Amino acid sequence: MQALINELMEKAGLDATQAEKAVETMMNFIKSKLPAGFSDKVESLLSGNFDLSSMFGGSSSASPLDALKGMFGNE
């Protein structure tokens, strides 16, 4: 998340407080648009600590594609 804050400061000319508020606002907006099972993953995604398979209830060894296939009945 710090990388995003730094980029906002550099490319948009925001100071640290403005950039942090922009990221917080964006995160809250995105979370409000996602189902509960996904919204709690937003911060992890932006922090770089995100395991896609965890979104689908799989283990870290399971392929995210396998999880998606299962969601749509394609075993």
Image (cartoon, grey):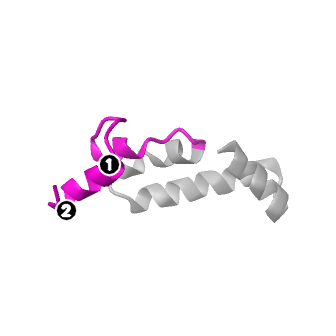
Measuring from the top left, give residue 10's x and y in whole percent: 84, 57
Query: Can you tell which of label 2 and label 1 is closer to the viewer?
Result: 2
- Hey, what amino acid is under mark 1? Gly
- Hey, what amino acid is under mark 2? Phe
The kind of secondary structure element at disc 1 is: helix
Magenta segment, which residues?
Answer: 47-75
In this rendered view, identify the residue nearer to me: 30 or 41.
Answer: 41
Residue 66 in magenta stretch: yes
Task: Compute the Cα span from label 2 to label 1.
Answer: 17 Å
In this rendering, the answer to whether 72 lies above or below 43 is below
Left or right of 71? Residue 5 is right
Q: Which residue is mark 1?
A: 37
Residue 51 in magenta stretch: yes
In this rendered view, identify the residue nearer to me: 65 or 42.
Answer: 65
Which of the two labelled residues, at mark 2 and mark 1, occupies the earlier sequence position?
1
The part of the image, by quadrant, that contains residue 18 is: bottom right
Quadrant containing the C terminus in the rendered view: bottom left
Residue at the image position 68 percent from the left and 52 percent from the top: 21
Measuring from the top left, give residue 74's x and y in whole percent: 17, 60
The kind of secondary structure element at disc 2 is: loop
Q: Which residue is mark 2?
A: 72
Quadrant containing the N terminus in the rendered view: top right
Residue at the image position 29 percent from the left and 47 percent from the top: 56
